[in-house]
Image (cartoon, rainbow, N blue to C red):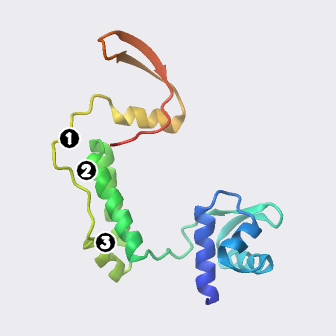
Amino acid sequence: MPRSDRLLRLLQHLRTETTPVTSSRLAELSGVSVRAIYRDIAALRAAGALIDGQAGYGYTLTEDGAMPPQRLSRLEIEAVILGLSAVQAEGDPELAKAASDAQAKITATLPEQARHNAEHASLRAARVDPKPPMVVDAGVVREATWDERALEIDYVDGEGRETRRRIWPLSGIFF
């Protein structure tokens, strides 16, 4: 495998593995020696990648706008477009708009062939029945989740009993 391909794959491993990623784990994933990983990390740093850490500890990639963009495969583009269209179909209005805006930004920054693939992606998510009305402000729940803070809610159980509860939202799940 050409070294340039190996370096790009190494960047991807640094993005996707739990950090800090040890050089032995990177060597295992890349199919090269630990010594080669040390050289590749040095080469990536010399090229401008912001990689924190050191031998014996592990490495963490800090994304940097000065680095060249990663190329997405056709299948990765399909996955991104499908995911964003699912959010547009299922998310609350604020989230659906954000997904639409993100799709436009991502598509605009792709090289010509990749942009064509994104614009003509074969997979989309859609809703065939009307979306039920939102009974909670999803934005408030999102903010509480991001900020790791509790919410006070009024709750009505299946038998109609009302209670006030303090909840700590961990995530939102659409189904």
Tag 1 or tag 3, which sits nearer the N-term? 3
Q: Which mark is residue 131?
A: 1
Label 3 vs label 1, nearer the camera:
1
Q: Which mark is residue 156?
A: none
Q: Is residue 81 above or below residue 40?
A: above
Residue 135 image offset from top left, x and y in percent:
27, 28
Q: Secondary structure at mark 3?
A: helix
- Front residue (pair 155, 50): 155
Q: Quadrant of the N terminus?
A: bottom right
Residue 89 image offset from top left, x and y in percent:
25, 50
Query: Is residue 126 in view from this perspective?
Result: yes
Residue furthest out toward the bottom:
2
Instruction: Indicate the amino acid at tag 2.
Output: Ala
Instruction: Indicate the amino acid at tag 3.
Output: Ala
Q: Which mark is residue 118?
A: 3
Q: CA distance from mark 3 to mark 1?
A: 26 Å
Query: Is residue 101 in view from this perspective?
Result: no
The residue singled out by tag 2 in the image is 89
Residue 115 image offset from top left, x and y in percent:
32, 76
Q: CA distance from mark 3 to mark 2?
A: 18 Å
Q: Count of labels shown?
A: 3
Residue furthest out toward the left:
129
Position of 137 with respect to 39 (left or right) is left
